[in-house]
Amino acid sequence: MQLDLEKMRDRIKASQWALADIDWDAPGRERVTENPELYAKLKAFMADLMWIEHVGARGFAAMAKKAPNDTLREIYTYFHAEEQRHANAEMALMQRWGMLDGEGLPEPNINIRLVVEWLDAYADEMPLSVLGSVIPMLEITLDGALCKFLLDTVDDPVCHAAFDKINADEARHLGVDFHVLEMLGHGPIYRQTLDMAGRLIDPRLLMGILAYLPLLNRMRDNLVELGLKENKLYEAIAKYKRVGGTPGGRRNPWFQLISRQGAWVIDRKNVFYHAPVDALVRLTGKIPPRLLPQIPSWVHELTWKPTA
Amino acid sequence: MTTSPQARRSARPQDSAVLHTYETLIVGAGFAGLGSAIRLRRAGIRDIVILERGNAVGGTWRDNQYPGAACDIPSNLYSYSFAPNPEWSRAYSGSREILSYIGSLVRQYELAPLIRFGQEVIELAFDKASRRWLAKTAAGQTYGARTVVMAQGPLSNARFPDMPGIGCFEGHKIHSARWDHGYDFAGKRVAVIGTGASAIQIIPEMVKQAGFVKVFQRTPGWVLPRPDYGTPDWMRALFRRAPAAQSALRQVLYGAHESMATGLIWRTPASGLLEQVARLHLRSQVQDDWMRRQLTPDHRIGCKRVLVSNDYYPSLQQPNAKLITWPIATLSPRGIRTVEGVEHQADCIVFATGFDVSKTGTPFPVHGLGGRLLSEEWQRGAQAYRSVSVAGYPNLFFTFGPNSGPGHNSALVYLESQIDYIVQGVRLVIERDLKWLDVHEGAQQRYNAAIQRRLAGTNWNSGCKSWYLTGDGFNGTMYPGFATQYRLQMRRLPQRDYSLVR
């Protein structure tokens, strides 16, 4: 997937929107608030979704530091802010639906929390090859699948209006994501593989993998708990392999590794993968919150208010 | 030519037949213009006119009177060596004090009679037949002169940036270089756009005065601590009685700044050291990890202008201040919309977004020999010979011309050596009654090829965007070397590189 990054940057700049462009008080909120069953499910779901966007935002912030040229750096700077905008818009929907308790932020689940911690501590030190390969996976599976579910389930017009805008942004994000994935596959395979082997013994990256693996399984469990078909998630994971599997993308060993892992996630019968990862999910669930470090200050930038 | 200078000057200059031809015409009454006039007069050039578009002297320092405005270079170095001022109140003086120093130059050297205020030059053309330059002004007058000193200033044109929605903002807009002293900031929500040299001086003052200040940053710069202090009385007394002591201090400051060149202009271990000093400065003043990340530059030190401040970082952390690093999407009637989707409402936006640096020409058309147009020749980047002369534009001398900018030392040191060089040129023309003095095209090309070769290895050309470079990345702004090197090359005007036409 080759694209002209400069044109893309101009298109991104020309497609900006703000929370104030949406009438958050327009009629239709009762379609969620007066459906108790949906309401309860949606509250936890929206919190997860919002946090996933926030994770994506932090990932892009790290990628902006690694960008090989000014145009890509600028694009990632915009994507960082746009992911934040999505999180803000989702928080505004929660506010509309009365799901925010006072001024406080919704709590993330423990696995998201661990990923946030890891990102904050190490993402800036990770090379573009790692970040540029894993961020599309997160965007396509979590972001993509979760949004799709939301739009299938909720018929509040304001929610649809917001997600029309969010999805248009995400389409551009994926365009750039897969362009970079392809770009990362350039260069001799042996060198890329050696580089990856070197990275894989970096304890910081290993910690990241330990934070990342249970996140996918946790999200799967959450979706099942919400009465969702996990297939939606699996379709999205398969899409990563399909769209990213260009000649260049396939040469990128990180793509190979991540899409292989995606296949393991989809294959519920693969006990060699799921038994330990599910154990990790349970284990992380037992971490007492007081042991976690203080939330990084960038988290407090989230807001549902269109004006400040 | 028997009429007195007074009578000649009062002749109506519109009629070119009776137009008086000055020995030298100087465009601009800022530091450069006044300094040139002083030195020219001392060298015996008496018939001088200074055209000033404003109604006061001081140029940049007259225009930049925003709260907190000060010079980044110690005053003992940011002043003329031939006109020391023992009374500087601080190591780094504020703009008012610098402006009053400029005013004192006018009084001390009796320059007032030379200055024509309200005369904005709109065109300058060399008239081969009468071998003189003709300057047209917006006021409809024409001035003729044998020689011209361009002292219009590189940072004299301020404008609002080309930002989407800038026309629709309904609040108050202020540009740092055109400060609105009548606006009361008390209790107001103020947005400051930009975090460059002007902004970091304005922001601490705004935080003191305004209700709430939001600072919109695009690219953070390296900030070094500023060793500022109030001048003790004994020091002033000493400088008054023993001027040698003051010039000794000037030499020490000069040497200290020269040594910074090794780190700021080229990538050397000293650059790493300076970056480390800046990082420590940041670490000691900002506790929050994320904010430190936001304020840590990605470019190497020296690539953009290095900032000096002790109160910028602390001011950003005041309860009524906030640093915003989200890109600006658009201005709206009520404020600034950033890409994270939030409209940051403001009563007033302060644009500390810099100046139109003339990289491709001068602020008005300059026609040389055969009607050639300077802006056309400089379209792809400005170039001159030793920053002062341009081939095809005889008897015309630039101050702060192409590749004369320092990144580490006082601009006035550079200016002084330009002026002394210009004085040699003007004297040649006047004393030998030359038709013209014009630099050889070849000499200019050789000089610039060497300059560009040397620039390639500097921090300015290391990949960041800055006002030093044109859109194509051409550096026609900075001088790649020590101030001492620059002074040496400016010491003598080499006649072999010029055609002297009688």
Image (spheres, rainbow, N blue to C red):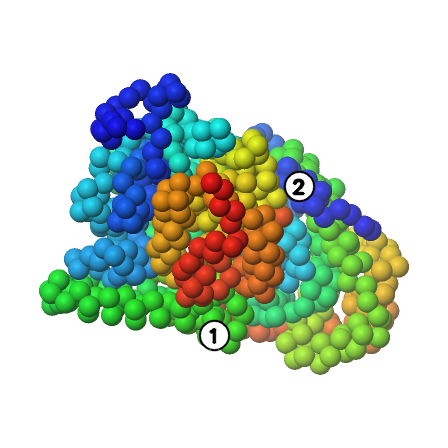
Q: Position of residue B141 (x, y in %)?
A: 36, 23
The residue type indicated by label 1 comes to: Ala
Q: Position of residue B79 (x, y in %)?
A: 28, 56
- Residue denoted by label 1: B270
Q: Nearer the viewer, residue A220 or B486?
A: B486
Horizontal side of residue A253 vs B97, given as left or right: right
Q: Quadrant of residue B431?
A: top left
- The residue at the point 69 percent across, 72 percent down is A209
Which dot marks residue A10? 2
Note whether B88 is above or below A150 in the view shown: below
The residue type indicated by label 2 comes to: Asp
Q: Is residue B170 visible?
A: no
- The residue at the point 60 percent across, 56 percent down is B446
Task: Evaluate whether label 2 is on the same chain as label 1.
Answer: no
Q: Rounded to the nearest whole Å, what is the CA distance between mark 2 and mark 1?
A: 39 Å
Q: Nearer the viewer, residue B338 or A88?
A: B338
Pinpoint the chain carrying mark 1. Answer: B
- Hey, which residue is sitting farthest right in the picture? A247
Horizontal side of residue B436 vs A125, given as left or right: left
Task: Give the class, few, some or many, for how many residues have Cα within 10 Å of label 2's Cα (few <14, many ≥20).
Answer: few
Note whether B46 is above or below A244 in the view shown: above
Task: Give the class, few, some or many, for how many residues have Cα within 10 Å of label 1's Cα (few <14, many ≥20).
Answer: some
Q: Position of residue A275 (x, y in %)?
A: 78, 75
Marks 2, 1: nearer the viewer: 1
